[in-house]
Amino acid sequence: MNRRDFLSSACKIAAFAGAAGFVNTAYTQTETRPNIIFILADDLGWGDLGCYGNPRIKTPNLDKLAAKGTRLTQFYTCGSVCSPTRVSVLTGNFPARHAIHGHFASTDQNKQRGMPDSLDPAVQTLPRLLKSAGYITGHIGKWHIGIEDASEYGFNEAKTTNGGGSDAYAMPDGYQAFRNNSTETFTDDAVDFINRHKSSPFFLNLWYLDPHATLEPSDELLKEYEHLRVSEKFTGAQQIYYSIVTNLDRQVGRLLSVLEEQGLSDNTIVIFSSDNGPEDIYISNASHSAAGSQGPFRGRKRSLYEGGIRVPFIIRWPGKIGAGEVDDTTVMTTADLLPSLCRTAGVGNYRPVDGEDLSHVFKGKEVKREKPIFWEYRFPDYSYHINRSPLMAMRRGNWKLLANPDGSRIELYDIKTDPMELDNLAEEKPELTETLFTRLLKWHKSLPEGEISPNAGSNGYNWPETLNR
Amino acid sequence: MNRRDFLSSACKIAAFAGAAGFVNTAYTQTETRPNIIFILADDLGWGDLGCYGNPRIKTPNLDKLAAKGTRLTQFYTCGSVCSPTRVSVLTGNFPARHAIHGHFASTDQNKQRGMPDSLDPAVQTLPRLLKSAGYITGHIGKWHIGIEDASEYGFNEAKTTNGGGSDAYAMPDGYQAFRNNSTETFTDDAVDFINRHKSSPFFLNLWYLDPHATLEPSDELLKEYEHLRVSEKFTGAQQIYYSIVTNLDRQVGRLLSVLEEQGLSDNTIVIFSSDNGPEDIYISNASHSAAGSQGPFRGRKRSLYEGGIRVPFIIRWPGKIGAGEVDDTTVMTTADLLPSLCRTAGVGNYRPVDGEDLSHVFKGKEVKREKPIFWEYRFPDYSYHINRSPLMAMRRGNWKLLANPDGSRIELYDIKTDPMELDNLAEEKPELTETLFTRLLKWHKSLPEGEISPNAGSNGYNWPETLNR
């Protein structure tokens, strides 16, 4: 990376984080470095797993993972849609810092949204940091971080789909046919990766396409939920969605069995999470995904209310993190993974990021975070009106502020006592609201310039006054 | 009706209404009495028609009905599920007064719920009042007011389904096959009824089964929404639900054409409404119905939030009520239909009911109601947590109070400024809240005794504190 590259990308990061130096994590070189497997589901909601309270979807393997590990109830994605969250995992930053506000689409669409066509490959990334510290790094499955090849970001091996022209997965029968079996295929390749690299510390991203629409479970998978069939003629949303989630669970179970067989379970950190909340029924090809659950929260995918950004997070590291524990205290995000995993893996130096080192969580400690969290989503959300949030959000302590940059729709919630975000305290607490709004606005103004969609942050309806008379 | 019957049913009504006498509507006998057609859809939401702002479902005939008539935006059903609303239409009373709290089911289930097996046929009913005043009265389609024959309630003609053992509609190919064509069948019979009775004033209930699940539109109907198909393998919720609503619209269109051909349009009041909000996706055989819209409101079927009880209401009466008007002021309910239609039809005397005579609405006037509205739903609601209401509700003026009888979950909303019911003002307005709660509780205590389901009025979730550790 030359000096100009540094200025054009990395330097901004340092400036934002308020420190230009390097972070020294002072790790102990003598500790055995754990393998890390980060499994990311796509559009799986907070309420979609048995261990998160779902009474209908069968997820025995993930429930078992939670029973042998710890489950966080306040884990957030840094995006309310796909690509931004993925960018935050890779970079440890809020995605808007890289001008990645929505999902990567066509070049024209990206341009229209003020987005590049890829995350700049020169930025500091989690896999590059781990690789430079001796890890074998791999990425298998969904990419969706733009048209640049995943291997450009520090992976020794990358086999991706949804990565522009660089997709490695062959799709002889067309995309849908490939999708239908992709969870098995990715798992096969993950098993292969593990078998080949079992003797070295490895980091593996295993990013599934499921349960993102379009869903087409096989007849065999549907059988499990035959009791939820709508009619002889039509298969219902529940039967389809639940079948896909249960299959995802089975494939994760298969992967965990391999770890067990290879004697790797004890020295492998396994993390399971999702990239955002569940899809809404208004997306035509995703109408089955409306059976996905955001748990008790307000909001689904695209929303900055909890249901759009709060997702399952299970971590298993036998002997280090508690078994069957529920961490209700730690407020953690996808951007915290870079500093936390670097610390855990013994990676000494990295440039400051938005995320916070919460690696003590991996040792079974509940941690009180210091840094606030910021979100934005600058595109319209046509879903159920009650779930449409303002376009910016911030969480500091137990307070969450949502607002539009023009000062409309200012909402303040005490997330601990009001996780559904129904009791707006903005009027009752004007000073706190003002302080947080100023801070949120400052953050938003510090982002790279770009278009904001006219309908972003609106929950408008053709309500009586404006109904077409 | 003997004295004992009177005491066991009707007398309570008089006592509740605060007057034991008869209402004198002082109608003008010389006016030509209008025919009345009351079309009731099943589980159709406030937001499911083009004229109520739906940009996707095609309902040209109902939109035209609204363009030639008036559309109310604050019309309520007196039940959040099927049977109670239907009882309120028939009796002019809140259904709980008759111990009808939920849908009629098996005798065992009714008993368990503290419900009779039918509405007492001896009670005062709208068709009996109209019949006694010279109207030919008919009921075609869904009944669901118990096992007693619909003809016992004052109909000259009744051809029903879902009426216990008295169902008149033959179902040679099984229930679903019948359902699939029921909207056409009912319309055929309505046309026949109109043709036979065109020279006398008539009152016709035309109660459709659609778009209540289970939905199975024909391939021909699905074609209209082919662009919303999920995949080659699966038909999606939107395609299925929208097809059914559009077919309902077509059949209503056919009926209106017949009125036009017969020269009856000018002297026929046509009303279109629905029995409650749209179904929730958690009901397995109704997962396609999740594509139904409650508009901007909180709540769906079973909920006492607006989305469960606020429905479309279109009334056309050429020359009397305005064409293309939107009445945002009048707060009207299904219980108001009895007094309002009696007045309009020139029916002189009826015993007091819970409903209010708002017949001026039918003459194009916006009316400010005097009586409060009361609701209850004493069974659990397993839908999306945010939509689950307390078990009692009351509206007086623009205030809506929701609460459980034990004083938990007291919520006060200003419906005019907060139609989404998100800004709970109970703490800010303790005196008003107390007054309304006392009144609501008094009403609830005055109802016939009966079981309340343990989970009624709860929006609980296995939230962190109680998650299975």
Image (spheres, coloured by chain):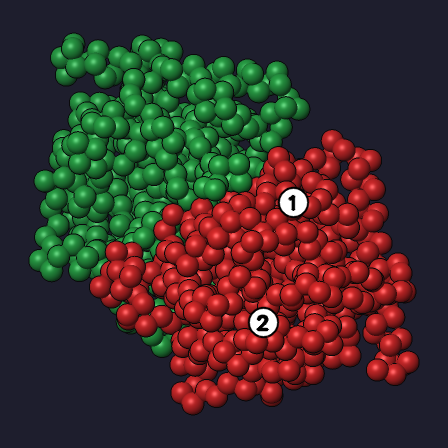
Chain colours: A red, B green
Q: Amino acid at mark 2?
A: Asn
Let me know if residue A169 appears in the view.
yes
Q: Which mark is residue A205?
A: 2
Q: Label 1 belongs to which residue?
A: A366
Q: Secondary structure at mark 2?
A: strand
* Residue at 65% in and 79% down: A155
Q: Amino acid at mark 1?
A: Glu
Q: Residue A127 versus residue B452: which sits nearer the camera?
A: A127
Image check: B445 left or right of A106? left
Where in the figure is residue A222, as x and y percent of width and height? 30, 65
The image shows residue A60, relative to residue B3, as above or below, that is below
Let me know if residue B345 appears in the view.
no
In the rendered structure, which disc, 1 or 2, sits on the residue that comes first in sequence? 2
Which corner quadrant holds the N terminus of chain B?
top left
Q: Residue B185 versus residue A396: which sits nearer the camera?
A: A396
* Residue at 61% in and 16% down: B431
* Residue at 79% in and 60% down: A26
Q: Secondary structure at mark 1?
A: loop
Please state the chain letter of the residue tagged with numbered disc 1 in the rendered image. Answer: A
The crowd level at tag 2 (other Cα within 10 Å; few <14, some 14-19, many 20+) is many
The crowd level at tag 1 (other Cα within 10 Å; few <14, some 14-19, many 20+) is some
Q: Which mark is residue A336?
A: none
Query: Toward which corner of the image does residue B218 lie, by quadrant?
Result: bottom left
Image check: B294 left or right of A268? left
Query: Toward which corner of the image does residue A128 lie, by quadrant?
Result: bottom right
Query: Toward which corner of the image does residue B122 lie, by quadrant?
Result: top left
Where in the figure is residue A185, as x and y percent of width and height? 44, 78
Q: Residue A151 versus residue A94: which sits nearer the camera?
A: A151
Distance, label 1 to label 2, CA atoms, is 25 Å
Where in the figure is residue B124, as x and y percent of width and height? 24, 23
The image shows residue A180, relative to residue B351, as above or below, that is below
